[in-house]
Amino acid sequence: MNIAAAKAVANIVKSTLGPRGMDKMLVNPLGDVTITNDGATILHDMSIEHPTAKMLVEVAKSLESSAGDGTTSAVVFTGALLEKAEGLIERGVHPTVVVKGYKLAAEKAVEILDSLAVTAGEGDRELLIKTASTSITGKASEKYNRLIAELCVDAVLAIHEEGKADLKHIILTKDIGGLVEETEFVEGVVIDKVALDKNFLLRIANPNIALIDAPMETEKTANKAKLQISNVSDIENFVKQEDAALFEMADYIIRAGANAVFCSKGMDDKIAAYLQSRGIYATRRVKNDDMQHLADATGGRPVRNIKELTEKELGHAGLLEQDRDGDQGKTYLRDCKGAKSVSIVLRGGTEHVVDNLERAIDDALRVVKCVVEDGKVVAGGGASEMAVALSLRSYASSIGGREQMAITAFAEALEEIPRTIARNAGLDAIDTILNLRAKHAENKNAGLNILTGAAEDMLEKGIVDPLRVKVNSIKAGSETAAMVLRVDSMLRAQSSSMQDVRPEHMASTYDGMSAPALNMRR
């Protein structure tokens, strides 16, 4: 039953594998529709109850976070491993023997993959673009494949430091209504705010940016007080004093030399008008995350006391630009030299197009990160799986006992990847595998060209995957299969919250209510 559940999940996503894979339509209880062929998204959004099936979902989630790609391959591979194991068990091979054989095969497979890897790195921009392009293929329009890949590579290279790339410093911003080809990389930050004055300048060259993390308005006291006014002049004096306090705040901005102000709290309209009449961009209630991105991108330091603002705290950019429609719009800070945060603005005609683009870019960013950090890639298009499978067959003959059968089964399961890619492309799966095996006798980088159906050198074609993606896929698949095979029955457990309760640890009342009586027998 456990093997059947895992195989069922694998079969659901199998048709999405490869550049010619099909899409799935996911409909939630509210009627919202998501159309995607991203394995992690499909499994995450599906309603799955079987415990074993949920294990495969966790595999997909883990791979998505660690490598960004290879989720569908890992699930298909896991399903194939369990299918092969089922056949071995029916022939009398004990599950623990299969598990041991799979463990040996996985360890050897990682060694083989490492020997097949080609060195890459941050300096090889073209290879990074090819890696991103391979990840995007089938997830977004092929017409814009190169454009999107270049944006992703530029973004990762802009924020990486000492061989590490933290993707939280790349902000994806959606702009629904444009064209996909207008999607752009911004060496800086984009926020969903515009100047408070509708008629303010749309562009400021070389802005000096003040980041204020404090209210720029009259401070409200905790105690209520009444002011007794006996004549009109008292009212005028009171208003003048209040305005003087407000304009004093604005003068700190002016004296510091800022010509753009981003405030995370409230800003009085009088201050905004005072600043903007002097050519200073002003906006308020900027999100905390955006304030941090502004600081990372411009080099500015948010100040909590406006009196502490000096020229040293100001950030800098090459250009401040507004794209506004009435009171709504976005502000772009471009050409921020040495920016630690950068942005990619996603554009498309509909929300569905932009959402699909976001998933594709997210995967591409993660695979580029893998290559920048690890510096190794392998041939894609099923080439690395075929090379490992053929080597494992030779390795199996050197292993005695029934573990040899499990290693051979492991190799057959790996071949399910190129077989599925071929099947989804409308090619004959049997002929494809036979052609690949023959081609690998002379070229270990031979993979499937889905356009011609021929076995060709994937490195020459620029179809490459990060080594980490392949290694993690094999490790996750073999470990998950081993866990499933070790389970011989499924039992209903008591609630985890009740397992370790002792009478001496229990309160007699809960907020004045009597504690429930528990049967503590074991």
Image (tube, rainbow, N blue to C red):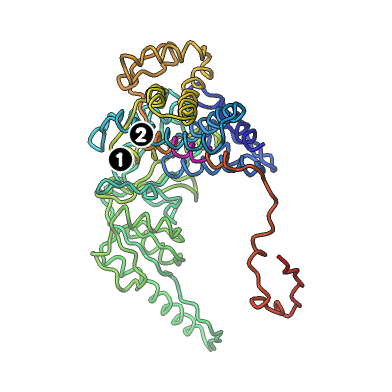
Check the image and report above or below for 274 versus 364.
below
Q: Decide: marks 2, 1 in contact (CB < 8 A)?
A: yes
Is residue 506 toward the left or the right of residue 284 in the image?
Answer: right
Q: As rendered, which of 340 and 389 lies closer to the eye?
A: 389
Residue at (35% x, 16% y) in the render: 440
The three-letter amino acid code for the residue at tag 1 is: Asp
Check the image and report above or below for 473 versus 91.
below
The three-letter amino acid code for the residue at tag 2 is: Pro
Q: Quarter of the image containing the C terminus? A: bottom right
Give the spatial CA distance, label 2 vs label 1: 8 Å
Q: Is residue 202 visible?
A: no
As drawn, the label of residue 466 is 2
Under tag 1, what secondary structure? Answer: helix
Q: Position of residue 96 (x, y in %)?
A: 53, 39
Residue at (38% x, 59% y) in the render: 262
Q: As rendered, which of 21 and 309 lies closer to the eye?
A: 21
Q: As rendered, which of 318 and 427 lies closer to the eye?
A: 427
Residue at (57% x, 40% y) in the render: 484
**Which residues fall within the magenta stretch?**
473-481
Q: Position of residue 330 (x, y in %)?
A: 43, 47
As drawn, the label of residue 199 is none
Q: Position of residue 130 (x, y in %)?
A: 33, 28
Q: Residues within 10 Å of mark 1 (few under 14, many from 20)?
A: some
Q: Main secondary structure of the magenta part?
A: helix
Residue receiving disc 1: 374
Q: How many marks?
A: 2
Is residue 198 toward the left or the right of residue 166 in the image?
Answer: right
Q: Is residue 136 visible?
A: yes
